[in-house]
Image (cartoon, helix red, strand yellow):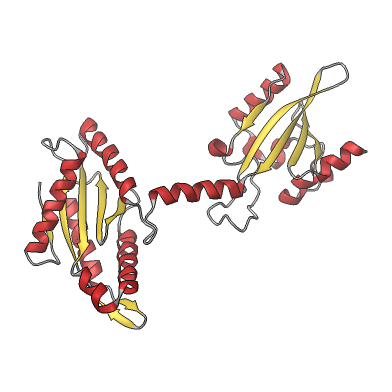
């Protein structure tokens, strides 16, 4: 009686299954989060209700428990969840399903024979959300929400090595907002922040899933274009330029139009470091601004 009260009152999921993988006990927590009552699932094979559990990892773990009395763990960082329960936390719009730490272990009878195993399920969604936010804080720009300089330099180094090792095309576009200081001086820094976010949002909507857009500093941005040669990068840069030039930025009823200048370069045989790529893109951007702004200049 006391065991049953604790079994149902405890604030984690508990399941007991036998060696045929049939459910023997199913606690209240599991009922609440699955919508399945104990009488519905007791006596049924666990895979009938949760076919997603039928994986080599899960089967190996069950065998390890029954054969050797081992304890097995399923960490959220590796598996996210065992049971696909819809997330109910108000803090986790990023996760469709509850994030779980799970474990299984042996249950022995009076003769010390393993007859059943238990599975416990712990909801760690809020912890996972918090950890994800910390990661994003280190990788994302706080104002625009796109990647920051730290991430850019790390990813640039990775793509540089990959391009060199496998002789893959790789290009870089660096751009900044023309006369951005005048925007700040004329309309105020709130408008300037709005423009930065607007540019980041527009370019983010144009780039491919494999591209990386980052705020490099101030009003300067950088976009990494894997599997893209210089001609493709120039075309992409022109799309960026036209999109920003044609965009109406409505700040508190005031339409603020801006342009951008862009420098383009690509990975070549004589590019000996990621820093050289950045330097060439910066030189191309400098030329674009000196030649009148609102244009694309490429240096190979």
Image coordinates for residue 160, horizontal then vertical, percent: 23, 38
Q: How many marks?
A: 0
Q: Quadrant of residue 245?
A: bottom left
Q: Which residue reaches farthest left? A: 291
* Depicted 70 relative to depicted 2: above or below: above
Q: Which residue reaches farthest bottom? A: 253
Q: Residue at x 27, y 56 (%)?
A: 217
Instruction: Report the quarter where the N terminus lies.
Output: top right
Image coordinates for residue 66, horizontal then vertical, percent: 73, 21
Q: Quadrant of residue 253?
A: bottom left
Looking at the image, residue 252 sits to the left or right of residue 291; the answer is right
Q: Residue at x 21, y 67 (%)?
A: 242
Image coordinates for residue 244, horizontal then vertical, percent: 24, 68
* Depicted 134 relative to depicted 257: above or below: above
177 or 63: nearer the eye?
177
227 or 149: nearer the eye?
149
Image coordinates for residue 219, horizontal then vertical, percent: 25, 62
Q: Which residue reaches farthest right? A: 1
The answer to whether residue 104 is seen in the rendering is yes
Looking at the image, residue 285 sits to the left or right of residue 95; the answer is left
The answer to whether residue 230 is seen in the rendering is no
* Depicted 187 relative to depicted 228: above or below: below
Q: Quadrant of residue 74?
A: top right
């Amino acid at each position: 009686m006391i065991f049953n009260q604790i079994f149902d009152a405890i604030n984690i999921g508990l399941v007991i299954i036998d060696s045929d993988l049939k459910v023997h006990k199913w606690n209240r927590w599991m009922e609440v989060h699955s919508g399945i009552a104990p009488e519905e699932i007791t006596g049924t094979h666990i895979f009938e209700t949760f076919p997603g559990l039928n994986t080599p990892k899960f089967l190996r773990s069950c065998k390890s428990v029954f054969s050797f009395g081992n304890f097995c763990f399923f960490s959220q960082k590796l598996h996210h969840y065992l049971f696909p329960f819809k997330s109910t936390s108000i803090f986790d719009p990023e996760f469709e399903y509850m994030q779980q730490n799970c474990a299984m272990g042996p249950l022995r009878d009076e003769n010390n024979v393993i007859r059943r195993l238990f599975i416990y399920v712990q909801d760690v969604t809020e912890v996972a959300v918090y950890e994800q936010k910390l990661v994003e804080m280190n990788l994302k720009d706080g104002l625009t929400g796109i990647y920051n300089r730290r991430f850019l330099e790390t990813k640039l180094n990775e793509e540089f090595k990959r391009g060199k090792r496998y002789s893959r095309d790789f290009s870089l576009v660096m751009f900044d907002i023309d006369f951005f200081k005048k925007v700040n001086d004329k309309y105020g820094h709130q408008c300037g922040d709005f423009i930065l976010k607007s540019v980041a949002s527009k370019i983010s909507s144009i780039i491919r899933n494999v591209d990386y857009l980052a705020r490099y500093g101030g009003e300067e941005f950088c976009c990494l274009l894997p599997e893209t040669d210089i001609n493709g990068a120039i075309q992409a840069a022109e799309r960026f330029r036209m999109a920003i030039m044609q965009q109406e930025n409505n700040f508190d009823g005031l339409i603020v139009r801006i342009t951008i200048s862009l420098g383009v370069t690509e990975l070549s045989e004589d590019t000996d470091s990621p820093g050289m790529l950045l330097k060439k893109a910066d030189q191309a951007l400098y030329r674009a601004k000196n030649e009148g702004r609102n244009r694309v200049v490429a240096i190979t």
